[in-house]
Amino acid sequence: MSYAVSKALQVAIYQRLQGDAGVTSLIGAAIFDEVPAGVLPETYVSLGAETVLDRSDKSGSGAEHRLTISILSEAAGFADAKAVAVAISDALEGADLTLTRGRLVYLKFDRATARREGTANTRRIDLRFRARVEDNI
């Protein structure tokens, strides 16, 4: 097993979202690895939790990344957050991303959870994707 491709996968996903017209038309550049201090945009995206499982075989080292991308919104109702979730899903489902290390075998939508968070009117949608990677080093 190798965790070595994790950073390259995250960078490629971030770049894909930052470069996708559908995503940026809804939230601009409000895609964060770490949510910054201060006033946040009404709706933003946070790259979140990741679980990595060994998927190595006799042909080489590999892993399955189960990663979460969260949409958080203070907008009334879930409509704005869901629009962003759809754009992210469209941008990533089956994407052929080029990694700086290793190779992406596939990137697939796994599941989503939508809920209200905290006592405020924050809406949160967690999108989970599965990415299978091979490390060729």
Image (cartoon, rainbow, N blue to C red):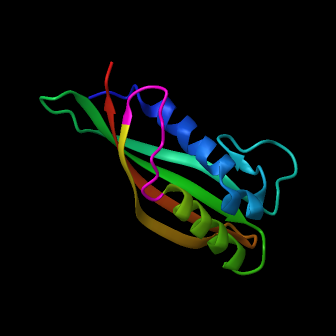
Query: In the shown orientation, is residue 80 left or right of residue 132?
Result: right
- Residue at 64% x, 41% y is 33
Residue 1 placement: quadrant: top left
Residue furthest out toward the top: 137
Q: In the depicted view, which residue is nearer to us: 4 or 103?
A: 103
The residue lying furthest to the left in this view is 58
Judged from this view, the residue extending furthest toward the right is 39
**Residue 4 lies within the magenta run:** no
State the image coordinates of residue 93 (x, y, percent, origin top left). Answer: 46, 59
In the image, residue 61 sits, relative to residue 108, either above or below, namely above
What are the residue bounds of the magenta stretch? 93-103
Quadrant where the C terminus sits is top left
Quarter-wise, where is residue 52 in the image?
A: top left
The picture quadrant where one finds residue 104 is top left
Place of residue 73 in the rendered image (x, y in percent of width and height, measured from the top left): 73, 66
Q: Residue drawn at (70%, 58%), measured in percent from left and top?
A: 21
8 up-or-down from 50: above or below: above
> On the rendered structure, is 63 left or right of 23?
left
The x, y position of residue 108, in whole percent, is 39, 57
Q: Position of residue 112 (x, y in %)?
A: 48, 67
